Every structure is written in C-alpha cells, then in structure tokens.
Amino acid sequence: MNNKELYTIFNQSAKFPLIMGILNLDPDSFYKESIVTTIHMALKKVETMLNDGLDILDIGAFTSRPGTEIPDYQQERQLLMPFLTAIRNEFEGLAISVDTMNSLIAQESIEFGADIINDISGGIFDPKLPELVKDADKIYIAMHMRGIPKTMQSTENTSYQDVVTDLIKYFSKTIEHLKRIGLHKVIIDPGFGFSKKTTDNFLILKNLECFQILSKPILVGISRKSMIYKNLNLSPETALIGSVVAEFYAVLKGCSIVRVHDVKETKQMLSIYKMIHPNVENKSNFVK
C-alpha cells in the first residue's frame, strides 16, 4: 500500500471513524477470543474481520496488560514475523499496524509490509522508534503510558493533578518533539487502562473532545477492558455491549479510530451513527 492510499484511508476519518481490528499472537492476552495460534487461523480471522468492515488490522506479539514482562527482541520477532508475512502476502491492500515498542521489530515490520507502528510507550521505551518511522515515511501511533506494563499501575504512575490536562500537556510536548524530528503522520491514543485508575479512564472518555485541540486523529482502545467489565461485574468475554456503548460515546466525542475486538458489532454501531449524523465532521484531522 502506498502513501497516497494511506492518506485516503486516514483522511476518511475526517468524516467517519475507522475500525482497527485487534489480532493478538501472545497466548497470555487478556481476551482469549482475540488470540490466534496458527497462520491458517489468523488468515481466516482477518478475512472475517474484513468482511465485517475492518479498515485497519493491528497485530501484536506481546501482551501489555498490567504486570506483564516485555519480551526480548528474538522472542517477539519469532512470534510476529511469520504471521505478518503471511497476512501481507494474502491481503495485499490491507492497512496493517504493528503493535511494538522495539525499533528493531518496527524496522523489520516495515520491511515486511507494515504501514503503521503502534507504540504504547509513545517513544519513551525506545527513542529510536519514532525516528525510524519518520525515515520510512510511515504512520506513528503515540500512546500515553507511564512506566512499563509491569509498573504502570503503581501509585506513582497513576497519580495526576488533572488527568485530562496532564495528558494534553504530555501529547503537546510529544507532538512537538516528533515534529522537530520530522515526523508529522501521528495519531494519538490516550491509553485507556494504561497508568490510569478507573475514574481517570472515564474522565478521559467524558472529556475526549478536549484532545481535538492537538489537531491529530484520536485513537480509542477500550474494547472489553477492565474499565468496562469490572464495573459491570462481568468478564472480558461478556463485556461486548458495554464496550460498544463506550465506543459510541467516544465517536460522539471526536474519536477518529476505534481499536476493537468486535469488528462486526462496531460496524453496526457506526452504521447507526452515520444514519443519525450523515454529514458529521470530525475535527480531528490527519496532518500530511
């Protein structure tokens, strides 16, 4: 997929949100239905998601749920690359995002056909990663997280003066830094569930439109997370309705991309949204 086609995809988010479907390779991921263990299984799942309305595939080879360890390079590479290669070969025109914090993994992923790098550390874990994405002229997702998954829910990492204001300041500095190195194709992700208490997550969601001041597309990933299922006394497996309701609210508040486990149901939700707001303009814009 060339850059012109990518711009077309992302510029569509100026009017209608895009669906990013999740494909997990790590067997320790918190939602077991998102995990694939064979290439055949992965290809069938991607085909189903495409038929259901997928715009972007996000593939990750490590789990980032609280308390987990970050895999080493060889472990992550060994798991990721065969799947990425097979998916790219099978679905030539599909926009593919790779979820990694490692610049070496990012570099190989781009060589193997990735269009987007989804960095949950926002460049803090591996400062070389944003530079690499810039040099490759690809798209970068910068998420907010303090610490690493193992430590992100500590008291120190979940203490804010004002979580919305603090995140806007963080992203403002991050975007300015990325701009200085020449990286302009940036999407921001508030990082629901990463270094946040439950009340923080819902305050961010409630005030999501405030992030439009940053003039970048906003990605929201709240699908089946603990902020949904724990508050409903459910499990990730039974949190579909709560997830879709929260995602609908995020769309109303200016979300450009929804990162989800359930593409079919999300597509149905967005179809109703478009019927209610056929000419809606999302103020989050993708800067070329």
Image (spheres, grey):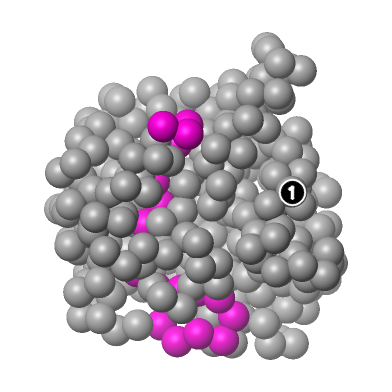
Give the residues in magenta: 51-70
Direction top: furthest residue? 279
Q: Residue at x 56, y 47 (%)?
A: 262
Please give the name of the residue rendered at 35% of the width and 82% of the height, measured from the top-left corner: 71
Q: Is residue 53 magenta?
A: yes
Residue at point 24%, 55% (across, down): 40
Q: Position of residue 271 (x, y in %)?
A: 64, 23
Residue 80's place in the image compared with 148, above or below, is above
Is residue 231 placed above or below 181 in the rendered structure?
below
* Camera-side residue of 142 and 237: 237
Q: Secondary structure at mark 1?
A: helix
Residue 110 appears anywhere in the view: no
What residue does disc 1 label? 241
Q: Nearer the viewer, residue 267 or 174?
A: 267
Name the quarter where the C terminus is drawn: top left
Q: Evaluate whether residue 239 shows in this view.
A: yes
Of the pair 105 and 144, the residue shown nearer to us = 105
Q: Is residue 189 magenta?
A: no
- Mark 1 residue type: Ile
Q: Position of residue 197 (x, y in %)?
A: 77, 73
Residue at 25 percent of width and 32 percent of height: 93
Main secondary structure type of the part rendered in magenta: loop
Vertical comparison of 12 with 158: above or below: above
